[in-house]
Image: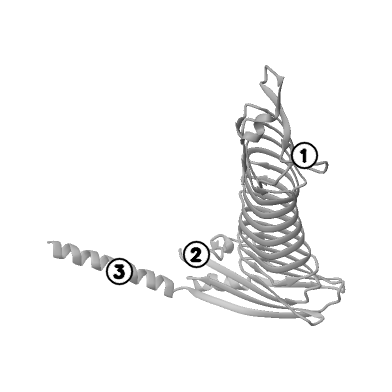
């Protein structure tokens, strides 16, 4: 009896494998390549609009931009696959000042598109899939605008302005030395260097090795940023890890911020989160923070000196003995609001300042 049951299980597994194999074998694929090239000048901007595929940007030393587009359409139904394939095209518009290249889905509202899966899902469930991959060869000093959905964008060095609008895909770049505007939703970002610009990141995991002057608008994002000069943040539900920042300002809610070295100035408005300063030393000019329901952690060098002032209520204080000599004043008995001020280290005429205005959180200071 057990032998018969084992044989039946093996037969079911074998049949399942055969069905899966036949299903895969029935997939029909149509593909084509489109090539196009245009002469350009330094004043020309290049724009690419795509869905369901990757875009590779390759540096060129020529005075032209060239496009190589590979289009694939797959379905288990030959007629449907061909119909999908025939309804995908690439449109080019060009003048002396712009070149626009766009993927077109003709008859887009037709039922032929209703079962198309994106590139990430492919044809696992037997649904139709399409893939439109671009290779664009362009000089690095040309203004570049790229919009892509359900695919990745890869580029190397670019010293002119670059605008990226990407969703459900990854963005990777080497050195962006021009002005950059990068918007990514639901993906990964990896940049070696970005000089200046704006980052809009939502549900992203990002690593930027070094940055100059950056405006960051982020939601539900994890960002590793080893070195940045000037950083302005508008953060919600993020995890920001910064090794070294010269100037930091902005606001954050429900975010975790960890800073190894704050070199000059910090000015932040924080709610429902936490911030860590792992090493404050005499290169730090000032730290001004207003916060509510936020935990503040400061580690400072034993040679550090500053003028310290804080206004707080409903707070937990974890402070070293140097704070015992600070002046403490009750400002509002009903609110239980206090003011505390004093000097850390040796008094100096040019000492840095730490000013805190916070409620309902932890203030922890420690000497390293």
Q: Secondary structure at mark 1?
A: loop
Across and down, in percent, residue 314 comes to 62, 26
Earlier sequence position, callout 1 versus callout 3 = 3
Q: Callout 3: helix, strand or loop? A: helix
When the figure is inspected, residue 40 is found, relative to residue 340, above or below; the finding is below
Q: Which residue is mark 2?
A: 127
Q: CA distance from mark 1 to mark 2?
A: 72 Å
Q: Residue at x 43, y 72 (%)?
A: 24
Q: Quadrant of residue 366?
A: top right
Circle 2 packing at 10 Å, graded few (<14), some (14-19), many (20+), is some
Residue at the left extreme of this rendering:
1
**Disc 3: which residue:** 15
Residue extending farthest to the bottom is 62
Q: Position of residue 327 (x, y in %)?
A: 72, 27
Is residue 207 visible to us here? yes
Residue furthest to the top in view is: 334
Whether label 1 touches label 3, CB < 8 Å? no
Q: CA distance from mark 3 to mark 2?
A: 21 Å
- Spot occupied by residue 87 in the image (x, y as percentages of width and height): 63, 70
Residue 347: image tag:
1
Q: Nearer the viewer, residue 341 or 225?
A: 341
Badge 1 or badge 2: first in the primary sequence: 2
Which residue is nearer to you in this view: 267 or 208? 267
Decide if residue 272 is on the left or right side of residue 16: right
Say which quadrant the N terminus sits in: bottom left
């Amino acid at each position: 009896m057990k032998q018969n049951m084992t044989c039946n299980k093996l037969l079911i597994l074998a049949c399942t494998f055969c069905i899966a194999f036949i299903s895969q074998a029935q997939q029909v694929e149509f593909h084509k390549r489109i090539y196009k090239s245009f002469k350009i000048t330094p004043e020309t901007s290049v724009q690419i609009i795509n869905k369901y595929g990757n875009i590779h940007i390759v540096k060129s030393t020529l005075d032209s931009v060239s496009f190589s587009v590979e289009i694939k359409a797959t379905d288990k139904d030959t007629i449907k696959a061909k119909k999908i394939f025939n309804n995908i095209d690439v449109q080019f518009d060009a003048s002396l000042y712009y070149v626009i290249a766009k993927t077109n889905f003709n008859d887009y509202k037709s039922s032929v598109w209703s079962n198309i899966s994106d590139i990430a899902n492919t044809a696992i469930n037997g649904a139709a899939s399409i893939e439109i991959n671009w290779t664009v060869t362009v000089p690095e000093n040309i203004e570049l605008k790229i919009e892509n959905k359900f695919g990745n964008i890869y580029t190397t060095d670019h010293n002119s302005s670059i605008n990226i609008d990407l969703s459900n895909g990854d963005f990777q770049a080497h050195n962006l030395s021009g002005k950059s505007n990068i918007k990514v939703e639901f993906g990964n970002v990896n940049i070696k260097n970005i000089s200046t610009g704006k980052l809009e990141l939502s549900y992203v995991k990002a690593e930027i090795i070094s940055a100059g002057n950056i405006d960051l608008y982020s939601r539900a994002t994890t960002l590793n940023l080893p070195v940045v000069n000037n950083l302005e943040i508008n953060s919600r539900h993020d995890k920001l890890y910064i090794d070294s920042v010269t100037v930091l300002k902005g606001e954050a809610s429900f975010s975790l911020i960890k800073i190894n070295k704050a070199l000059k100035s910090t000015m932040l408005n924080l709610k429902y989160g936490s911030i860590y300063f792992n090493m404050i030393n005499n290169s730090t000019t000032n730290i001004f923070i207003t916060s509510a329901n936020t935990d503040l952690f400061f580690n400072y060098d034993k040679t550090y000196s500053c003028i310290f002032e804080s206004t707080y209520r409903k707070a937990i204080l974890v402070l070293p003995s140097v704070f015992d000599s600070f002046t403490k004043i009750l400002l509002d008995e009903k609110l239980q609001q206090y003011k505390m001020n004093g000097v850390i280290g040796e008094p100096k005429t040019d000492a840095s300042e730490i000013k805190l205005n916070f409620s309902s959180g932890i203030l922890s200071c420690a000497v390293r």
